Image (tube, grey):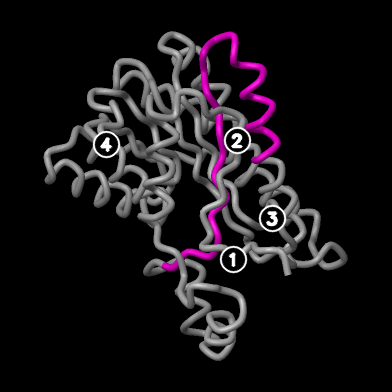
Amino acid sequence: MDLELRGKAALVVGASRGIGRAIAVALAREGARVALVARGVEALETAAEALRAGGAEAVAIPGDVSTEAGAEAAVKRAVAALGGLDVLVNNTGGSLGSGRFQDATSAQWQSVLDLNLLAAVWCSRAALDALKVRGGAVVHVSSISGREYWPTSPYVVAKAGVIALAKEMAVSLAEHRVRVNSVAPGSVMFPGGSWDRRAKNDPAMVERMLREDLPWGRFGTPEEVADVVAFLCSARAAWVTGACVTVDGAQGRAV
């Protein structure tokens, strides 16, 4: 299926590894010109260089989008480098060690909300003028933690907020023909990711999870999430907006 993304200008935030990097690869594979934003300069440039080696047009833009000023600067550079913007993917996130409601500190609340929710707000606001010119698409990467229980209170709240943000933006921006959706991945395994670290630190817990919590007996992959995101960014999803698509292998099933 041709997703009609060839030549489109796409900005992927949080693109140096894992799901974000896979999204950048998926968009580039469809012919999009991609700007990659992340904080880690070395990993970011490695990701962009791999895309360029495959024939894609890709630019690496280091930046910290958890602050409004950082988000504005990164988006401005991306729009200038790409000559406009058709697609924005907000993929920043992490629980940052936060715990249950009674345990999470004020600093954890602020940092988790900044990284997971407000980063999507700041990047979307900074990109809005450019997106309105072409009637673009925005995808926020949330989590099934935003739809289910998980014992990290700030993270659950932030990811639920991302889903709500997509719904509100979809309605508000319909008049500008800007589509906004979110995806809610389940547990995804990739080298250096949180589940990779847990598998090394507590293999018994992960083995139990594979038996009891993951119906397919395995973790998801970044590529499986990325393919759904690429579809939502494309003209093939022209009538999909305000949706949250769960990509979890039925992990979040009702029990």
Q: Amino acid at mark 1?
A: Gln
Q: CA distance from mark 1 to mark 2?
A: 19 Å
Q: Quadrant of the N terminus?
A: top left
Q: Quadrant of residue 74?
A: top left
Q: Which of labels 1 and 3 is toward the front?
A: 1
**Range covered by the magenta-colored residues:** 163-189
Please rate how many residues cluster around mark 4, counting C-alpha atoms within 10 Å: few if below 14, some from 14 to 19, many from 20. few
Sequence-wise first label, 2 or 4: 4
The numbered dot on residue 118 is: none
x and y percent of residue 30 in the render?
A: 24, 36
Sequence-wise first label, 1 or 4: 4
Above or below, 4 relative to 102: above
Query: Which residue ends up furthest to the bottom in the rendered image?
Result: 204
Q: CA distance from mark 1 to mark 4?
A: 28 Å
Q: Are marks 4 and 3 in contact (CB under 8 Å)?
A: no
Query: Which residue ends up furthest to the right in the rendered image?
Result: 102
Q: Closest to the observer: 139 or 104?
A: 139
Q: Amino acid at mark 4?
A: Met
Q: Which of labels 2 and 4 is toward the front?
A: 4
x and y percent of residue 182 in the render?
A: 56, 39
- Residue annotated with mark 2: 243
In reply to whether residue 165 is colored magenta, the answer given is: yes
Q: CA distance from mark 2 to mark 4?
A: 21 Å
The numbered dot on residue 1 is: 4
Q: CA distance from mark 4 to mark 3?
A: 36 Å
- Residue annotated with mark 1: 251
